[in-house]
Amino acid sequence: MDLSSLQQQFDQQGVVVIPQVLDKAWLNALQQELEAAIAEDTQQRPDVFDAGMVHNCMTRGKQMCAVLDHPLLNHYIKALFTPHCIIYAYQSSSLTPGQGNYGSRVHVDCPRWIDNYITNVGVILPLNDFTLQNGATWYLPGSHRLAELPSETLFYQQAKRLLCQAGDMVIFNARLVHAAGVNQDNYTRHALTINLCRPYMRQRFDFPRLLTRQQIDSLGEDGRRLVGMNVRMPVSLDEFYLPPEQRLYKPGQE
């Protein structure tokens, strides 16, 4: 897709849809891993406030980890955000029949508003089509430029629906005002969501310590960057004085 047109749309609307980034094999594998993780969490933590949302998805399945190295995902987030971005949070968003979820409140995914500066970008990987029937996300075009959230009444008067297909990739400014819909269909609608931040910012979890050595070793250059392997803090003077090629905090992380 033409990056110049995408950048213009991203700047003006606050959101773009990249068609068919993930093929059917990817979608099937990701959905199987996600449903297994949801079932496990439901048994272990049934009463949490965001029940049904899986956190730290890169630790819950090989394909949910491997998608972090997907070339198209990295190509577009580098072009529209920054080539040094890291993951703030990587979780799921599912709507069961007749339900909304924790994301159904009118909200933004980044509490900071800095005029003409992006600190966070969101990525949605729909594993099912987003339709009006199954709760396609509401969003207010251009609202990423607002310092304050609009009233709920104004939001729903002017909001549009984010209609896209399974396998597409949605990239949005994390200041975009949005809300998950309510699923009126008879099947659960699944998606993976990734919140990306600047490399100098803190992540929700300490991913370099949270991931196993095997999970880290399975990642390529982009995946390792995304989980924060290029911005680790030294814990001793020995680590601080390592040669440049071995330093835990790599140079040029802007």
Image (tube, helix red, strand yellow):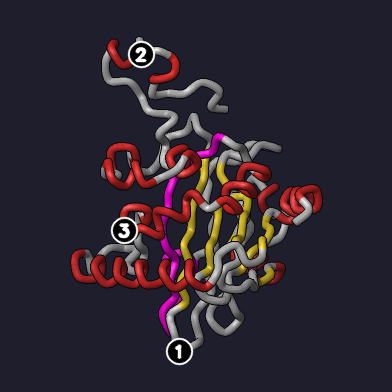
Image coords of residue 128 (percent x, y): 52, 75
Q: Determine contact: label 1, label 3, CB under 8 Å.
A: no
Residue at 78% in and 53% down: 2
- Magenta residue check for 103: yes
Please give the residue where the numbered disc 2 appears in the rendered image: 242
Residue 186 image label:
1
Q: Determine contact: label 1, label 2, CB under 8 Å.
A: no
> Callout 1, which amino acid?
Asn
For the C terminus, the quadrant is top right
- Magenta residue check for 122: no
Residue interval drawn in magenta: 84-104
At numbered mark 3, what does the secondary structure look like: helix, strand or loop? loop
Give left or right: position of 227 versus 182: left
Image coords of residue 91 (percent x, y): 41, 57
Q: Is residue 182 above or below residue 220?
A: below
Q: Earlier in the sequence, mark 1 or mark 3?
A: 3
Q: Nearer the viewer, residue 185 or 84?
A: 84
Residue 132 image label:
none
At numbered mark 1, what does the secondary structure look like: helix, strand or loop? loop
Image coords of residue 242 (percent x, y): 35, 13
Q: Earlier in the sequence, mark 1 or mark 2?
A: 1
Between disc 1 and disc 3, the foreground one is: 3
> Callout 3, which amino acid?
Arg
Image coords of residue 14 (percent x, y): 69, 53
Q: Is residue 183 above or below residue 198?
A: below
For the N terminus, the quadrant is bottom right
Image quadrant in which you'd find residue 204: top left
Q: Earlier in the sequence, mark 3 or mark 2?
A: 3
Please give the residue where the numbered disc 3 appears in the rendered image: 60
